[in-house]
Image (spheres, grey):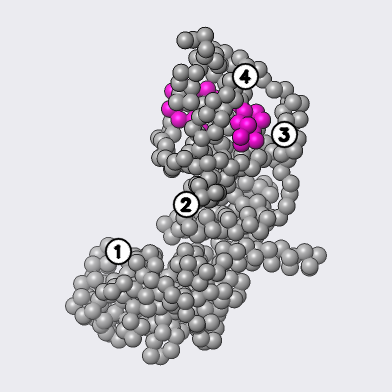
């Protein structure tokens, strides 16, 4: 039996003809069950009515210039636990592995292996029945020279076209993030997903830096699109500020995001710019609950946690007694709270205006589920196309300028007093508004970046 098996060392060079990868160094690891291939810019797509996945690979370690664009049939999505205990959902492909003169099909997961020493991990499932491993040896089937590597990859040098744009966010699987990556690539830009938690900074007056997992220095970016979850606002804004220190254009500035996340400060800022809001009270002391309720016109009223998001931490108190209970409960948590008049005539509806670069590019009406007063799509609300009035457009644009945001979702409610502003969101979701309007909102965001660089070029 062993006569028919390939003998490998702990490290070997192999190739994947169907992926167009002429040679790649692999770690041969019988302790690992699954094989893994380094991949970036991973995106599923449909080809001939079948599921496929496209991805890019830098096949040579520590070489970002050499890049190969690959695509392969998608056979599965799998949760994989790494040796460090990190769990990750990965796409699984099947393709032919060629090692020496032998060739056979193997399954591989796709993952970013920048922090690993090898672009390829050959696991035991791929070796079973075909391979014997001598862990004391390396490159038993040969090793390419530097010159032969250059020759093999001479046509794979990355051409510099378009802008180099980083999407600074947390979840690459989120609809909004996928769409922004697709829109940038469709317009010819080099897109990189940067996971906020995998970035870290060097604070230095002369050479400030941002590093990514594996010690890669994030430099030479033209623009960053920050998409920061409320739970990591502090760190996300610190990273955005660091990119600004490196003279990288950020679609929303760190200062604008920070102030938009402070609900109280943002409301004060909007009022100072003449933007009308529902009557609102703010408190941190339980002593004058009664007066606080009177201040906003009595019950029913809305009670909001200052740090709430996507409709969470928002309660409708229909009676004075209920309002007192909710307010006192929130205060017992030492939470800062807002109380706000309830606009009953809105009937659980609000308007989301999507503003990009000082223009309302799309608008939808969001309607709450029956028995619910919050119209957020995340809470089961429905979205429909609506024609907004000139006044509502004016409020949305004015609010975005007041907050100094280039991209914002502005929520407006129609009241008996006229349109009132509810909230300005610095990382608005795209799924509801793109689905309802069929507009390419992600593409409009990329255009706003292009416009900034075009203006800079014209000024030179």
| Residue 63 appears left or right of 2 | right
Mark 1 residue element? loop
Q: Position of residue 415 (x, y in %)?
A: 39, 87
Image vertical order of residue 249 relative to residue 375, above or below: above
Identify the disc placed on residue 153.
Answer: 3
Mark 4 residue element? loop
How far, Cα to Cα, is label 2 from label 3? 31 Å
How far, Cα to Cα, is label 4 from label 2? 39 Å
Mark 4 or mark 2, which has the lower sequence index? 4
Residue, disc 1: 334
How far, Cα to Cα, is label 4 from label 1? 69 Å
Q: Position of residue 403 (x, y in %)?
A: 54, 72
- Kindly identify the residue that appears in the image at 41 percent across and 35 percent down: 81
Residue, disc 4: 101
Image vertical order of residue 324 relative to residue 90, above or below: below
Depth check, front residue: 251 or 29: 29
Mark 4 or mark 1, which has the lower sequence index? 4
Residues packed near mark 2 inside 10 Å, few (<14), some (14 to 19) or many (20 plus): few
How far, Cα to Cα, is label 2 from label 1? 35 Å
As for residue 20 lying within the magenta part, the answer is: yes
Q: Which residues are magenta?
A: 15-36
Residue 403 seen in render: no
The reply to whether discs 4 and 2 touch (Cβ–Cβ < 8 Å) is no
| Residue 323 appears left or right of 172 | left
* Mark toward the viewer: 3 or 1: 3
The reply to whether discs 4 and 1 touch (Cβ–Cβ < 8 Å) is no
Residue, disc 2: 173
Which of the 4 quarters of the picture holds residue 287? bottom left
- Kindly identify the residue that appears in the image at 43 percent across and 75 percent down: 384
Q: Position of residue 392 (x, y in %)?
A: 50, 83
Mark 2 or mark 1, which has the lower sequence index? 2
């Amino acid at each position: 039996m062993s006569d028919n098996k390939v003998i490998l060392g702990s490290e070997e060079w192999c190739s994947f003809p169907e992926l167009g990868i002429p040679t790649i160094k692999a770690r041969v690891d019988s302790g690992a069950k699954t094989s893994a291939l380094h991949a970036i810019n991973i995106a599923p797509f449909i080809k001939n009515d079948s599921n496929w996945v496209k991805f890019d690979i830098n096949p040579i370690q520590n070489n970002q210039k050499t890049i190969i664009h690959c695509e392969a049939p998608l056979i599965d999505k799998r949760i994989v636990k790494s040796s460090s205990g990190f769990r990750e959902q990965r796409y699984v492909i099947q393709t032919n592995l060629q090692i020496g003169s032998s060739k056979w099909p193997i399954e591989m997961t796709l993952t970013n292996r920048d922090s690993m020493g090898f672009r390829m991990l050959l696991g035991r499932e791929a070796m079973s029945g075909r391979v014997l491993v001598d862990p004391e040896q390396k490159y038993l089937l040969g090793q390419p020279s530097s010159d032969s590597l250059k020759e093999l990859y001479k046509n794979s040098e990355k051409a510099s076209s378009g802008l180099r744009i980083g999407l600074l966010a947390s979840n690459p699987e989120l609809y909004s993030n996928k769409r922004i990556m697709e829109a940038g690539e469709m317009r010819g830009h080099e897109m990189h997903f940067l996971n906020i938690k995998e970035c870290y900074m060097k604070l230095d007056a002369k050479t400030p830096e941002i590093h990514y997992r594996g010690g890669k220095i994030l430099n030479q970016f033209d623009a960053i699109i920050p998409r920061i979850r409320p739970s990591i606002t502090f760190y996300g804004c610190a990273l955005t500020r660091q990119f600004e220190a490196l003279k990288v254009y950020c679609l929303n500035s760190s200062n604008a995001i920070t102030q938009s996340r402070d609900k109280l400060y943002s409301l004060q800022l909007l009022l100072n710019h003449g933007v009308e809001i529902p009557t609102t009270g703010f408190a941190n002391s339980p002593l004058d609950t009664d007066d606080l309720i009177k201040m906003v016109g009595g019950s029913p009223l809305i009670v909001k946690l200052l740090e709430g998001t996507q409709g969470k931490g928002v309660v409708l108190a229909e009676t004075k007694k209920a309002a007192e209970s909710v307010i006192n409960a929130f205060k017992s948590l030492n939470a800062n709270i807002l109380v706000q008049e309830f606009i009953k005539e809105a009937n659980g509806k609000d308007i989301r205006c999507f503003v990009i670069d000082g223009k309302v590019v799309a608008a939808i009406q969001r309607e709450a589920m029956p028995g619910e007063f919050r119209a957020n799509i995340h809470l089961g609300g429905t979205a429909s196309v609506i024609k907004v009035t000139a006044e509502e457009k004016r409020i949305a644009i004015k609010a975005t300028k007041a907050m100094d945001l280039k991209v914002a979702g502005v929520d407006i409610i129609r009241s008996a007093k006229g349109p009132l502003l509810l909230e300005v969101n610095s990382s608005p979701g795209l799924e509801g508004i793109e689905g309802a309007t069929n507009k390419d909102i992600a593409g409009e965001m990329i255009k706003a970046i292009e416009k900034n660089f075009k203006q800079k070029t014209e000024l030179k």
